[in-house]
Amino acid sequence: MISIITPSTRPELLPIIEKCLKRQDHGDFEWILTMPKKFIKKIDVTPTLLLEDPPKLPGDFWSLCKGWNQAYAHAKGDLVINIQDGIWFPPDTLSRLWFHYQNQPRILVSTIGHQYDGIDEMGVPTNKVWHDPRARTDIAFQEVAPSEMEMVMCSIPRAALLECGGIDEEYDTCNGAQEKEMCWRLNKLDWDFYIDHTIEYKAIQHPRLSDDWDKIYKEKTTPIFVRHMTELDKGTRKLNVESISKYVV
């Protein structure tokens, strides 16, 4: 079984995911949605499991890291697929990611996506505003470095998440880089990383969650990430952050 994980703060962008999931040719999946309490009453979809995003703690800038880990802890599938809110994806997406997992169970697979002003329910976009720089036409399936992984739509074996302990929740004190750091820990644990250039999603462009997003990233996120990478190189960083275990019921 596949567990679809969608942490969200934008309930208006969720219906397009539900419509895509209903069209999938791989039907053995669950959809776990996690979001802050104030947004739950606004959703117009029916996930398999709806979780309230853990509240912010003193010093937190956002709490999506906790939301991810909580969802990972509840996931029952052998393969977990992160799907960001507001994206359209082809009907064979789950079956193709499942195929990769069946053939190479120790890999993470990222996909290619572009951003548009809008997308209708059949996936027809309007006005491309961003092109994925990783996209290639000369190769279909490519092994890459952890730094090239993008988690907007990415498959992760559940065994990998349990081995690394999930997302480091120190990143809730800032913004971004949490998935990239997790991939580097998984790299040290001998997991491999691929991009399937033939799976292309379409994403609805959305603004930053706050006006000071880039400022906070530069001042707080970057130093944390640099410190963690330095500790990984020295062999002093713990590879299992034990985050998921806090949410196991």
Image: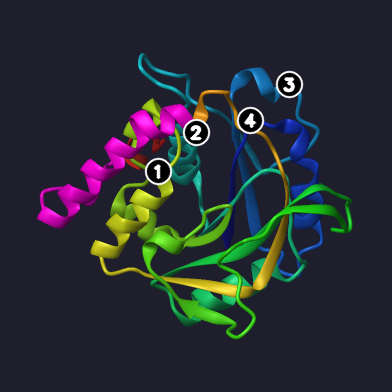
Q: Which numbered disc, 3 or 2, marks the residue that appears first in the sequence?
A: 3
Q: Quadrant of residue 37?
A: top right
Gap between marks 3 and 2 measured at Cα:
18 Å
Name which residue lies at 40% across and 43% down: 178
Give the percent coordinates (x, y) of residue 102.
Answer: 51, 78
Give the percent coordinates (x, y) of residue 1.
Answer: 57, 63
Which of the pair 166/187 is nearer the observer? 187
Say what amino acid the circle numbered 1 marks: Gln
Q: Which mark is residue 64?
A: 2
Gap between marks 1 and 4 measured at Cα:
17 Å
Which of the pair 132/36 is nearer the observer? 132
In the displayed structure, would residue 184 be above or below residue 96? above
Is the C-beta separation of discs 2 and 4 under 8 Å?
Answer: yes
Q: In the image, is 10 to the left or to the right of 188?
A: right
Q: Which residues are magenta?
A: 214-242
Mark 1 — residue? 178
Mark 4 — residue? 9
Which quadrant holds the C terminus?
top left
Give the percent coordinates (x, y) of residue 69.
Answer: 43, 40
Gap between marks 3 and 1 measured at Cα:
28 Å
In the displayed structure, would residue 186 be above or below residue 191? above
Q: Which numbered disc, 2 or 4, marks the residue that appears first in the sequence?
A: 4
Say what amino acid the circle numbered 4 marks: Thr
Q: Secondary structure at mark 4?
A: loop
Name which residue lies at 68% across and 24% down: 40
Is the C-beta separation of discs 1 and 2 under 8 Å?
Answer: yes
Q: Which numbered disc, 1 or 4, marks the residue that appears first in the sequence?
A: 4
Mark 3 — residue? 41
Say what amino acid the circle numbered 2 marks: Leu
Q: Secondary structure at mark 3?
A: loop
Q: In the image, is 14 to the left or to the right of 229?
A: right
